[in-house]
Amino acid sequence: MRPMNILMVASEAAPFAKVGGLGDVVSSLAQHLSLLGNDVRVLLPFYSTIGEEHRKKFRPIPAVFSIHLGEEHFARIWEYVSPEKVCFYFLEYDRYYHRDRLYDSGGDGFDDNAYRFTFLCRAAIDLPDFLQWTPDIYHVHDWMAALVPVYLETVARRGRLAKTASVLTIHNLQHQGYADRSILAYGGLWDSLFRSDQLEACGGVNFLKGGIYFANKLSTVSRSYAEEIQWPEGGCGLHGLLRFRSGDLVGIINGIGEEDWNPATDGRIPHGFSAENLEGKAKCKGHFFREHWKPVAADAMPLFVVISRLYWQKGLDVLADILPWVVNGMAVRFAILGSGDASLENHFRFLGECFRDRIWVRIGYDESLSHLLEAAGDFFAMPSRFEPCGLNQLYSMRYGTLPIVRATGGLRESVQSYAGGVANGTGFVFQDLTHQSLHDAIGWACATYYDRPDDIRTMQRNGMAQDFSWKKSARRYLELYGWALEKKNNS
């Protein structure tokens, strides 16, 4: 396959702007596609939250960038070329992107999010003329970039982009992007698109629905999630459209950065280790207690770790409910790092105060501490109600920390469950998210830890041997791009 020109459009890309796994995925995939010989470029907003350590590396493109919405707007483009030769473009427009957060002010989303990301999508369409460079593929991510395929197949279907195809990746179907019908006029889109089989939903415009309808190919971040979203239980109201497009929908599981998440070379942890020698892992556990959980000292109890956004999707409300029951009935400790829903944050703070020697809680996010907890933990609790892919279970297996997960989406696909007495698994998988089933899964892991330590060691090595690199996933995306181009140019 010949090298391709690929333009990714996203609302996040690590390390510049990151709220969740989306930022990691966009950057890592772009880097690996570039290493495979493709010309890969990424467009994202120039948020005011981007740190000065990154800004000082950006170079402004001198010309004024004209964006053709319902009326003409003018912005500025900055660029940065990564060591992997990925070119990042940053769209500067302070009216929309000079905020203290990416999507919200600490609660509901910004009132003008629909306008902010329509602006980004139209900018993505006008960027090739500005650069005098034509992409073969637009790879767009989630609802924030989902209008790009709509533009490609309507107002921009002729000219420079006539043969350019699109791939839309759905990272989380729950977030779809709704706006009033007037957003079409603002974006310079045809009013005739306001139809129930295209962009209209519940009397408004649904960005993701439009992207699903118009994109040449669709992907999700695991095969299991691609199946689940075609049914009412997981389809968030779009299951019928997704089933209609099922022939163009594939699941490609995310990879992880082998360089960033390698316990043998990770500079964020005090002691390196490998599957062959796990001594450093025990030392990391001791370091965590000495530096972060004084005066509690490491002992023979297993350490269960949670690193997560604290939201309903993650099932952590159920964990919070049963934690007193767990720590009163089992010899275990929990370390919880995350932020999100205010009531859940307060619930975990309360538990940390009530059970100071058994439950450690840090509200917020700390990249270095997340690496340390992955290295220090014995188990990683991830009882998600749904999980398109998940990354932390992959990080955990890489660090010999056995995941305890519900059988959904990418969790079901990536974690092989332990079969009692046969240490051929990489974690503990349970079926239904109830208080009793989660309690039993934790008890199952705890009993195995105490009664069958050799099985635990074998499973740790099994998990650390898994190949979750981006190399394999990047090649699958290149195949998908080829199918998208074939469909676009043969239709």
Image (cartoon, rainbow, N blue to C red):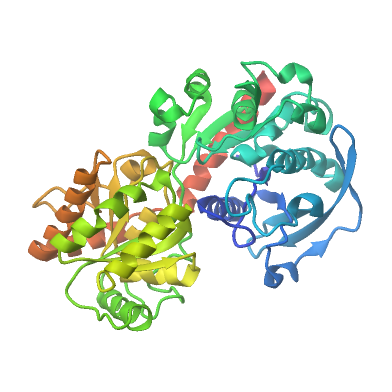
Would residue 129 be found to the left or right of residue 456 on screen? right
Q: Is residue 231 visible?
A: no
Q: Position of residue 95 (x, y in %)?
A: 80, 51
The quadrant of the picture occupied by the N terminus is: top right
Q: Position of residue 34 (x, y in %)?
A: 62, 53
Q: Nearer the viewer, residue 279 or 201?
A: 201
Q: Identify whether 129 is placed above or below 147.
A: below
Q: Nearer the viewer, residue 112 or 177?
A: 112
Q: Nearer the viewer, residue 399 or 363?
A: 363
In terms of image quadrants, where is residue 86? Answer: bottom right
Q: Nearer the viewer, residue 42 or 104?
A: 104
In terms of image quadrants, where is residue 327? Answer: bottom left
The structure residue drawn at horizontal position 72% and vertical position 32%, both measured from the top left corner, is 164
Would residue 419 be found to the left or right of residue 40 on screen? left
Q: Is residue 176 visible?
A: yes
The structure residue drawn at horizontal position 65% and vertical position 35%, both measured from the top left corner, is 146
Q: Identify whether 96 is placed above or below 167.
A: below
Q: Identify whether 278 is placed above or below 459.
A: below
The quadrant of the picture occupied by the C terminus is: top right
Would residue 444 be found to the left or right of residue 475 on screen? left
Would residue 363 be found to the left or right of residue 48 on screen? left
The structure residue drawn at horizontal position 75% and vertical position 16%, both measured from the top left corner, is 192
In terms of image quadrants, where is residue 280? Answer: bottom left
Q: Position of residue 319 (x, y in %)?
A: 30, 52
Q: Position of residue 296 (x, y in %)?
A: 27, 80
The structure residue drawn at horizontal position 38% and vertical position 73%, both measured from the top left corner, is 264
